[in-house]
Amino acid sequence: MINSKDILLHKEPNTLLNEPSVDFHLILNQQLFNIPFNLLLKNESILYNTLESHQLQIKSISQEISKLLQKKEKLPSTFDKQVEITAVDKITLLINTVDSIEKSIKSIYNHDLQLILTLKKRYEFFNNLKLAKETRKQNALIDWYQNLTNLLITDYLIRNSNGTPTSNKGIKFFNQLHNDPNNIISTHLLDSDILITSNQISNSLLINHDLSLLINWIETNSHPPLSKSFKNLIFQSRFQQFIELIKQNDISNAIHCYQIHLINFIDDPTHFNNVKAASGLLIFYPFLKSSLSSSNDSAITSTTYFDRIFHKNLKSKSLSSSSSSSSSTISNFHNFKLNNNDLSIYKHLLHDNRWLQLNDFFLSEYYSIYGISVNDPLLIYLSLGISSLKTKECLIHGSTSTSTTPSQVQSYINDNVLNNKCPVCNNDFKSIASQLPFAHHDNSILFDNPIMLPNGNIFDSNKLTQLTSQLKRQNIYHLNDDQVLDPIELKVFNKDQFVTMYPT
Amino acid sequence: MTELLESIQKEIEGFSLPDKPSEPLIKQCLIDTHDFKTQLKKLKAHLNKNIQDYDKINKDSSTSKDSKDIQIEKLLKKRLIISDKLVKSQKQWDHSNKKNTKAIHQQNSRFKKNVIHKLYSDFKLDDISLETFYNINTGKSNKKSHLGDSSIDNEIKNIDDDDYSNGIRNGNIKNRMDLIEIKSHVNSAIDFHISRYIIENLPIDINLNDTNSMTNYLKNTYNIDENTSSQFFQMGKLIHDMKNTNFDSCINWAKPNSNLHFELYLLKFLNLAKDSNPNSPTPIVEIINFLQNGFGQDSLVLKFNQILLKISPLLTQLLLNENNKNNADLVEDTPVEENSSKSTYINKDEKLMKKAILVTNNVINKQLQKCVSLFTKEYCQRNKLSFDSPLFLITLSGIISFSDFIRCKLIKSVKNVGWSTTDELPFNVDLPDMLSHFHPIFICPVQKEETTRENPPYSLPCHHVICKKALDRLTKNTSNTTFRCPYCPATASLSRVQKVRFIML
Ligand SMILES: [Zn+2]
Ligand SMILES: [Zn+2]
C-alpha cells in the first residue's frame, strides 16, 4: 500500500539529481492515465448500452422463431414449409442485428486497443525513468527530463496557440523533435486532441466573442446529474448569450433565450439575482448604452508571496462570502441587488471582461472533467525553478566589462571565464525572475581550494592556475611560471601571494 | 518509490485477456458475438436445407407416401433441434455478454481504485498555483479534483460549494497583462529552446548551406525570429555534415589539438576503415595517407598516446584483414560491441580477429554521438550560448524543487510555522551540481544568511570569513578596535579586515 506521507515527506535517498521518485512523477502527471482511462470507461458504457438495447429484441425474436418451429404438426401431411420460410426471414433479421452489434463491438474494440496501447506507452515512459534511476545513468536521466520538458513545452504551446489545430506550433515541434511527422509519438504521450478542443473553444470566446463552440460543447457534455459548477457554466454561457443579443438589439431572441434557458435558474438561489438582473437589462439597456465606458479596474490587494501559498484556500473562500472585500469585480457583482438603483452595476454585465470570466469558467470546468491542471504546468515549473535557482547575485551580475574595443585577453576572459550561464540571469527570464523570491540556502556553495589574492578576490586555486596556463598556451597573455592573472581586475599576481581561505 | 508504477503495470495488464496479452477484454465479447452470428448462420442454413429437402421429397414421385412421411417426420424433428439450438445459443450469448461486461466493469473498477484514486489522492500540480508565484490572479480555481467520467463517477467528486463563485473573481485587466508579459518572455525562451534542439532535425528539403532557407523555415513553421534562430545555423549545418560523413567542415572548425579535433579525426578514420562496401573498400594506402596527413604533425606527436591506444590496434587488424582477403569466407559479419572490439584487437587469437568485423556501424554511431556532443558543447561555449537551454534547466529545477514546495505546504498545514522572510523561500532546495554552480553562494557562519552586495563578506586576519553584519555586531561594543574571531582564538583588528569577493570560474 502506498502511504502518501512516504512520497511527500521522504525524499528518495541516493538519487543522481536529487530528483523526485517515479511515483511522485506519476502523481504530477496523473492526467496521462486518467484521460485514456476515462475513454475506456466511456467505451464500457457504450458497450453496455449497445448490448442492452438489443438483447431483449434478440431474445424475443429467438423465442418467436423457436415457438414457430416447435408448433406441433400432428401429421407429416400437414408439414408447411412456410414455417421454415418465416423462420429464415426472422433469423436473417436476427443475423443482421447481431452483425451490426458485432460491428459496433469491433469499433469499440479497436478504440480500446488504441487506448490500452496508449496506457502501455505511458507506463513505459515512466518505466524508462525508473530504469535510468536504477542504472544510475545520468545521461539517460537528463534525456528523460529533456523529453518531459519538451512535453511540457508542447502542452503549453497547444494551450496558448491562437491558430488553427493544423498550424499548432506545439504539435509541429514535438513531432519534428522525434523525427516523426505522423503524429504517433505525440498521441502516445500527449492528449493533444483534448487540449486543442479547449484551445479552440477558448479562442472563439476570447478572440471572436463567439459562444457557438462553447454551447455546442456544453450540450454534448451535459450528462446528468450535473455538478454545480457545470450548471453554473451553463447559466453563465446562456446569460452571456442573452447579454449579446441585447447588445445587438435582438430583443425577441433575447426574450426567447430568457424564456428557454435563463428561466430554468430562477429557483436557484445562486443565480436568482442574475436572472432578475437579466430582466432588468431588457429594460435598462438603452439607458446604459449611452453611458457605456470601460470601467476602472482596481488593482488586486497585494498580498505577500507566502500568504498566497499558504492561505490561498482560506482567502478564496472568504472572498466570496465577505462583502468587505473590495478588490475585485466579483464582490460588486455578487452584492448586486436589483433594488440598488445604481445603473453602473449593469456595466459589469456589459463589460468585455465577462468574456474572460466565461472563458475561465469554461477552462476550469473543462480541465477538471479531464483531471488536467488548470494552470499551464510549464509556467508552474518555471516559477518554482526560477525561485529555487535565484541567488542574491543573480540579475545584478549581468554586464561584464563594457569597453568598446576589448583587448584580446579581455574578450577571451569575457567569453570563456566570466560568461554567466545562469539560466535565471538569462535575458528571457530576467524580468520574470525579478518578481520571484530568492532561493534559501542553508550552506555555502563555493568551490574547492579557495585562495584569496591580495585584492580580496577569492578563486578556486586550480581553476585560476588552469586559466593561466590556457592564456599562456594560446599566446594570449605572457605570464611567468609562478604568476597568475586575476581575470576580474586583469592584474598579475605571484602564486606565493595566494592566501588559503577557510570560508566555512 | 515505484509502488504506484508497479500497480499501474499490473492493472494495465488486467485490461487484456489473461491468455492473450495483446487482446483487450472486449475481444472475448467480439469472439462470442461472432460465434453467435456464425451459429445463427448455421441454423439459417439448416432451415434452408429443410425447405430444399421438403421440396425434393415432394418432387420425387418415385418414393412411396410412407417413405415420404418418414422423411418429413425427420424434417419435423430437425425443426425441433434447430429451435432448441437457437434458444440455447441465444441464452449462451446472453450469458457470455453478462460475463464479459462484468469482467470489463470489474477491471475498470480495479483500475479506478488501484490507479486513478491513488494518482489523485495526495496532491496535484495545481496545489502550487501560478497566482501564488507571480502575485497575480489568474481567476482559475484550483480546488477541484474531478476523477473519472463526470457522469459515471459522482461518488469521488469533491466540489467545493464556493467554487462557482471563484471562477468569476478574475477580470482584473492589469493582472492579465502581467500574465501576457510573462508569457511573452516564456515564448521567447521557448523559441530559443526550439532553435537549439530542432536544428539537428530539420526536414531534408531545407538547404543547410542557405541561411535564408533555414531562416524562412523556422520563421514560417515556428514563428521564430531570425536573431534567435540564426545563432544555431552553423551548428545545424556542421552536425548535418557529420551525419552525412562529411567530417572535414567540422575538423576545420575545431581548434587544432583540441579534444574535439582528435575525436573527429578518429571518427573519420573509423569511417574510412569501415568495410561498408566489401567490393571496393577504402585502400589501406589511402587510410594510412589520411592518418599521416589528415591531422597535422604537431597533433600526431601531441596525441601520440591516444593514437597508440585507439588507432594502432585497429590499423593492425585492418592490415591483418587485408592479408586474409583471400580467405574471405572466414570473415563473418559478427557485430561487435565497442568494448569487446577493443579487447578483440588486443586478443592474440588470430581466428577470433578474423571473425570480428572490423568497425561496426554501432562503433561509428557511438563515435559520431560523441563528436556531436563535444562539438555542440564547444559550439555553444564559443558562441556564448548555454549548452542546455535555460528553459530546460529552469524546468528541471522546478520539477526537482516541486516536492520541497509540496512538503513545505504540507508541513505548514500541519504545524503553524511562521516564516520570517517573504523575499526568500522558507526552505532549502537541494539542487544537483549541474544546477547549483552558476554563482558562488556564501552563507555567513555567524549570521546564517547569504552575503549580498549590501552585506558583503569580510576576511579576518585568520582568514575566516564573516559577513558585514556579523562584523558590525562583533565590533559594536568594543571600545578599542580589536575583537575575537568567532571561530578561532585569534584576535583581529578592524584595520586588518579585508572585504572579499567570491568568484566562480
Ligand atoms: Zn543568476
Ligand atoms: Zn579565525
Image: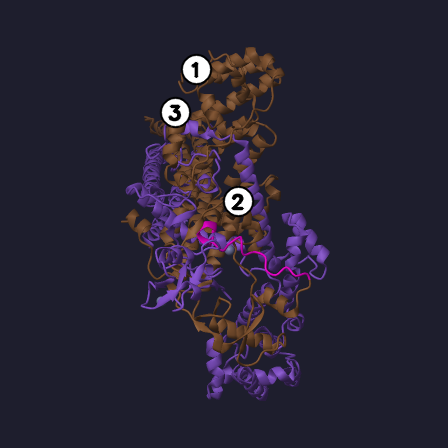
Chain colours: A brown, B purple
| Label at residue B302 | none
Quarter of the rendering containing residue B283:
bottom right
What separation in Å lies between label 3 and label 1 (alpha carbons)? 24 Å
Residue occupying image coordinates x 65% and y 61%:
A403
The three-letter amino acid code for the residue at tag 1 is Ile
Identify the mark at residue A156; answer none if there is no mark: 2
The residue wearing badge 1 is A266
Counting residues from the start of the chain, the first of labels 3 and 1 encountered is 1
Of helix, strand and loop, which mostly describes the magenta segment?
loop
Disc 2/disc 1 C-alpha distance (Å): 39 Å
Observer-nearest residue: A468 or B45?
A: A468
**Residue type beneath disc 3:** Ser
Which residue matches tag 3?
A322
Check chain identity for marks 2 and 3: say if they share one: yes
Residue B20, visible in the rendered structure: no
Q: Quarter containing ligand 2?
A: bottom left
Tell whether position A399 is magenta: yes
